[in-house]
Image (cartoon, rainbow, N blue to C red):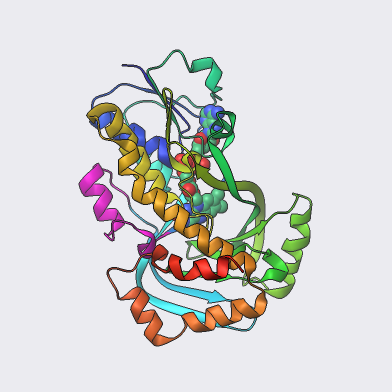
């Protein structure tokens, strides 16, 4: 059997690791160089985890994948123009990302692989489609799904990521929702270590040129607690997939639409879908059935997206101050049955406004 994986991001690497455990040979192609300059941090939230299990223990037990975070996430602070909200507890994990140093999520998985990655190899589907029995599409973009008419776009945004040097708490993330400087997107501040953090501004429906304008507005409104040493920009989009398997292609990670369009979180789904695709190839597991709860979650998160799109700054103040109510906090964070998408039915009302 001949298997190719296009893309050595989180989804492609997780699939590669699972295929190795199943003793299935494969080729894995990555368009970028081995040492990629992109560097940032991400968090995984317990509330997002459809398994309601500890992510680290879950991937170790079920996928034999060892992951070590930068830190546990203990505090989230959220701000709107005139309200704020803080939640503390065992909320999830923070991980460094990229291929810059050995502690990043990608590099941790690469260290557990034996198969070499074919770096600097941009793969076009047409060049390899007939050569392989299975092609796992893990490109992190909608380009291939769009080519096969499988994609419906739901959110597009430019993101500017700035590295800030200054004292930094390694267990805290901060988020801002403010229509003036991020439209329907948001800003978040996340640590890289105790001396550095990343600030990410996500603004939807703008051109790349307009990002400078929103970045300046943000910096004028929220002065950074440190020195901004570098920035880079990314374009991201999320969407729904009509089919996860098409001909000999299996779509995983962001290119299968498994990134929610409310916060743009897709780390856990990338790892899970990579593992499930390998089980489909090697163990006859039904990939589509396995990923059905994830598909449902992504569709439910779309109600959050639509609700936020319909809010103005006053609505955001009300939302943030409501989230700060102790009873609601207990209901959300101490309730083992509560997932991020549990509130979706309530939000349908706002999303139709
Ligand atoms: C700035 C930022 C912040 C984020 N924050 C969070 C967060 O806090 N929490 C969270 O859960 N998620 C977050 N995410 C989303 C999360 O990172 C993604 O959902 C996850 O990385 C998806 O993994 P993937 O493997 O599908 O795609 P990627 O990680 O994007 O990997 C795709 C890979 O494919 C390669 N590639 C593309 N095309 C080709 C080709 N034709 N040939 C060969 N190689 C190709 C790319 O170079 C890349 O290495 C964030 C994303 C970004 C960009």
| Residue 99 appears in view | no
Quarter of the image containing the C terminus? bottom right
Count numbered badges in the picture: 0
Name the spot of residue 65 as percent of width and height, x first. Answer: 28, 44
Identity of the residue furthest to the left in this view: 61
Image quadrant of residue 73? bottom left
Name the spot of residue 134 as percent of width and height, x first. Answer: 38, 22
| Residue 259 appears in view | yes
Vertically, is 85 above or below 227?
Answer: below
Name the spot of residue 42 as percent of width and height, x first. Answer: 47, 56
The residue that appears at 28% across and 29% down in the rendered structure is 20
- The reply to whether the magenta stretch includes residue 72 is no
The residue that appears at 39% across and 25% down in the rendered structure is 116
- The reply to whether the magenta stretch includes residue 51 is yes
Range of the magenta residues? 44-67
Vertically, is 255 above or below 230?
Answer: above
Q: Nearer the viewer, residue 341 or 236?
A: 341
Vertically, is 181 above or below 108?
Answer: below
Q: Nearer the viewer, residue 213 or 297?
A: 297
Name the spot of residue 19 as percent of width and height, x first. Answer: 29, 30
Vertically, is 251 above or below 313?
Answer: above
Q: Is residue 78 left or right of residue 216?
A: left
């Amino acid at each position: 059997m001949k298997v190719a994986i296009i893309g050595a991001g989180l989804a492609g690497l997780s699939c590669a690791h699972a295929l190795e455990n199943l003793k299935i040979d494969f080729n894995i192609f990555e368009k970028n160089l081995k040492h990629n300059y992109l560097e940032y941090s991400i968090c995984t939230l317990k509330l997002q985890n459809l398994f309601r299990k500890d992510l680290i223990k879950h991937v170790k037990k079920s996928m034999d994948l060892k992951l070590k975070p930068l830190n546990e996430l203990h505090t989230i602070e959220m701000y709107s123009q005139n309200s704020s909200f803080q939640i503390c507890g065992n909320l999830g994990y923070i991980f460094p990302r990229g291929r810059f140093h050995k502690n990043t999520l990608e590099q941790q998985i690469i260290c557990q692989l034996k198969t070499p990655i074919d770096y600097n190899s941009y793969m076009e589907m047409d060049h390899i489609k007939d050569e392989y029995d299975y092609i796992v599409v893990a490109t992190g973009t909608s380009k291939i799904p769009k080519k096969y008419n499988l994609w419906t776009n739901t959110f597009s945004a430019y993101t500017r990521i700035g590295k800030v040097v200054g004292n930094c708490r390694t267990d805290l993330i901060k988020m801002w929702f403010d229509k003036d400087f991020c439209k329907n997107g948001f800003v978040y501040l996340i640590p890289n270590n105790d001396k550095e953090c990343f600030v990410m501004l996500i603004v939807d429906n703008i051109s790349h040129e307009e990002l400078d304008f929103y970045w300046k507005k943000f910096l004028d409104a929220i002065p950074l607690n440190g020195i901004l040493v570098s920035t880079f920009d990314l374009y991201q989009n999320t969407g729904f997939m009509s089919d996860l398997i098409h001909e000999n292609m299996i779509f995983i990670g962001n290119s299968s639409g498994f990134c929610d369009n409310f916060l743009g979180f897709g780390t856990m789904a990338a790892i899970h879908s990579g593992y499930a695709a390998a089980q489909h190839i090697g163990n006859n597991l039904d990939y589509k059935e396995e990923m059905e709860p994830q598909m449902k979650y992504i569709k439910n998160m779309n109600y959050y997206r639509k609700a936020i799109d319909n809010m103005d700054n006053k609505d955001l103040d009300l939302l943030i101050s409501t989230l700060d109510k102790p009873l609601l906090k207990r209901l959300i964070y101490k309730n083992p049955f509560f997932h991020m998408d549990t509130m979706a039915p309530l939000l349908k009302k706002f999303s139709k406004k």
